Amino acid sequence: MMDIDQVRGDALSAIAAARGLDALEAERVRLLGKQGQVTALLKTLGGMTPEQRQAEGPRINGLREAVTQSIAAAKARMEAEVLEARLASERVDLSLPAPERPRGSVHPVSQVMDELAEIFADLGFAVASGPEIEDEWHNFDALNIPGTHPARAMHDTFYFPGGKLLRTHTSPVQIRAMTGAEPPIRIIAPGRVYRSDSDATHTPMFHQIEGLAIDRGIHLGHLKWTLETFLKAFFERDDIVLRLRPSYFPFTEPSAEVDVGFSWVDGRRVIGGSDGWMEVLGSGMVHPRVIRNCGLDPDIYSGFAFGTGVDRLAMLKYGMDDLRAFFDGDLRWLRHYGFGALDVPTLSGGVGA
């Protein structure tokens, strides 16, 4: 029979001499593991007589408790020492600037869309949306675009089997607005559109905004005033001069390309001034046939429509040269041209402010 007092003394000395958590864990296994020294003593209780068990049991259990408590105390001390050393090595100098976290930015297209929505909200226009996968009636037929029109060719439009297609403009939203509500109607329709085209100023997917107003007695003067007010507010200049140049669109009659005056500044064309003319919009009075296709009487109602590229407006306002960079996902470009989250356009003072 082992001398329990001797075992206790040796065990407590070994625990106190352990250097580090790994050494302490090794002592725990040596003493209290399945094959440990104290565990072996506990197993001897089963072979003792009741008298022996009554005498030796408390001593052996006391040994186990003493060893367990000593190991726990040593472990707590060592963990505190490790934490103290770690805190000392990871000391933070609060006088240094905090590390800068990666920051996102608002894409110029999103920013311009927000600006357009604010401007036209002040003019009484609601924002309307529609599906990007359209049928031929909404995208072409209802808009008075004949089957022989080049825009309906396979090399200009992305078609799906079964007569569906990716919309080539947001004009289908105007058709849905006219067929789904009674006049007066005043909407803008911003969104993605798709055409089979790609170069420095064209991409297969781009963003467009169209406007529509339908009511009694609307005439070309209303269109000109709306566009002039919109462009002055968007480009934040009062010297915007418009020129309506006769043109042709199947869905408007009469139709007009809208040119604005520009000036040369440091070799760049800047909207505003009188150095030359630049085309920025297509517009016109809604064709009577389109009004009739939507179930309205063109003898009672008239209206105007206009459309332009959101990406082109962003390029003109913020001095960007290549449309393809809008969709490259280049973080350097986005850091340069992107907007902060708090750069939210507000026109609380009104369009004329």
Image (cartoon, rainbow, N blue to C red):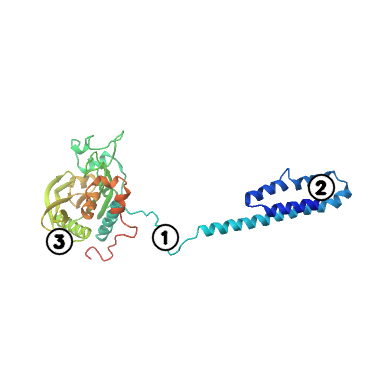
Q: Residue 2 carries which label?
A: 2
* Crowd tier of the residue under label 2, counting other residues whose Cα lies within 10 Å: few below 14, some 14–19, many 20 or above: few
Of 171 and 332, the residue lying toward us: 332
Is residue 161 placed above or below 92 in the rendered structure? above
Q: Distance between the residues labelled 2 and 3?
A: 106 Å
- Position of 273 relative to 253 (above/below): below
Nearer mark to the viewer, of 2 and 3: 2
| Alpha-carbon span between mark 3 and mark 1 | 46 Å
Q: What element carries label 3?
A: loop
Left or right: residue 2 compared with residue 131:
right
Q: Give neighbour class at mark 1: few <14, some 14-19, many 20+ (Cα, 10 Å).
A: few
Residue 128 percent coordinates (x, y): 30, 51
The vertical placement of 155 against 276, above or below, is: above
Q: Is residue 127 visible?
A: no
> Which residue in the structure is indicated by mark 1?
98
Mark with earlier residue (2, 1): 2
Q: Residue at x 80, y 51 (%)?
A: 4
- Label 3: which residue? 239
Q: Three-letter amino acid code at disc 3? A: Asp
Q: Which type of secondary structure does the marked residue at label 1 adopt?
A: loop
Q: In the rendered view, does 268 fall on the left or right side of 13?
A: left
Left or right relative to 43: residue 16: left
SS at mark 2? loop
